[in-house]
Amino acid sequence: MKQMSLRSMFLLLFTIAFSIGLFALCYLSFTNGDDWTSFPANRHIYKNGTIVNAGDITDRDGVVLATTEEGKRIYNPDFYIRVSTLHAVGDLKGFIKTGLSTSHWDTLTGYNRVTGLFSAKSGGNNIELTLSAKVNTVALKALGNYSGAVGVYNYKTGEVVCMVSSPTYDPTKEGKEDKGIYINRFLSSSYPPGSTFKLVTAIAALETLDDAETRTYVCDHGTTVEGETISCMSKHGEMTLREALAKSCNAYFSQLAIDLGADTLQKYADKLGLNSAAEIDGIKAKSGRIDLSNIRKVDLGWAGMGQYTDLVNPLGYLTVMGAIANEGKAVKPYLIESVTSADGIKFGSSSTDYTSQLFSRTTANKLKEMMRYTVSSTYGDHRFPGLSVCAKTGTAEVDEGITPHSWFVGFNMNDDYPLAFVVVAENAGAGVGVARTVANKTLQAAKELF
């Protein structure tokens, strides 16, 4: 009898231990299954550490950007298509963390937590992007030897038609690993915005000051604040907000920022999402940094015109352009148009989604008119044939003795081509130069999509 009791106790303890172990295994499999499956040693989807068993990635026109053939991952045969779309598609080794081959490996391979890699046996899922390989190629060629980022999206639907990061490289070649080639500068970088930030200061003013449009300040090659000089390239004299934006007057916007106050300017930078990490199809971008706490007046003046310690992310700033174009409420950008299984079943189609009302329609329409005037009176409409561009340049100072970054941001006001854009060319000088040229060439290619 005693022996039976011991056996029963042993069986009970064994059953409890087995149940606990089974529960722990199920729990760990559910919570860590993604990491275990995506480990490069998994031969079901990897070979020699590179992902091979995955579906196709195509652009908006069906151009195949990456596919699997006989257990080998293949990129598009055209060099410029390969390199201009690489940061969206991703590399074989997973070094580009924001590339779809890494960020959406589960979708591409057909993995899910319920069936595991069952559907991977049939080749995984195909992803159709909103990107245009043609437009990406034009943008990359336009950037030339400059590092930087180009982003263009349809501000009515949210489709990202261009996302280019430079420097880039050919994923089919083994070669020298230059610094920064794995970073998607459109998603994972932040830059001083220079004079493009004057748009944020203008939004804060139009939202909070009754006399924002008629308020004047004087520019005498700059202005003096607390005994320190904030310089300006020209002696603009007395100006209104509209004139100051067109001439990109540092003196005007520094004085305007000081009168607005740090709290107000900080409020609108936060409200516009410049201190938050933007997101596109589950891929988090780097957040900007606008920190005006415990700031001196003179530094607030510099911050209001896009210098001081201001940093913005290109994707986040593209959304702000979309908000101005869309009467204060932006359409959220997206990159994945749809997902189709190997059996031809389409699922996961994207749809248009909006941010909250970031600022009033009245403010958006007033600023839109000012940006349109800036192009027509300063940059020249002839530089953007067939378009009605509203824009702002930026010449962002970096370290002393180093050529500034070149910015050009804005949107096309004509609803026939509802395109918003952001261009930053590192160390390329004035925004009216390289960045403007890149923007026009990219927009000319993008309008052919309509």
Image: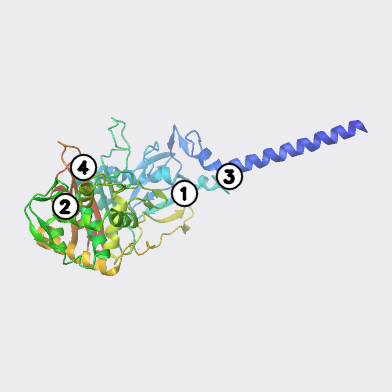
**In-front residue for pair 225/104:** 225
Q: Quadrant of residue 20?
A: top right
Disc with the residue nearer the chain's start (2 vs 3): 3
Which amino acid does the dot numbered 2 rest on? Arg
Separation of residues labelled 1 and 3 (CA atoms): 17 Å
| Residue that badge 4 annotates | 426
Q: Tell us which disc is closer to us: 4 or 1.
A: 4
Disc with the residue nearer the chain's start (4 vs 3): 3
Q: Is residue 384 visible?
A: no
| Residue that badge 3 annotates | 30
Residue occupying image coordinates x 20% and y 48%: 298
Contact (Cβ within 8 Å) of mark 1 with mark 2: no
Which amino acid does the dot numbered 1 rest on? Thr
| Residue that badge 1 annotates | 107
Disc with the residue nearer the chain's start (4 vs 2): 4
Percent coordinates x, y for residue 295 in the rendering: 27, 47
Separation of residues labelled 1 and 2 (CA atoms): 37 Å
Label 4 element class = loop
Q: Tell us which disc is closer to us: 1 or 3.
A: 3
Contact (Cβ within 8 Å) of mark 4 with mark 1: no
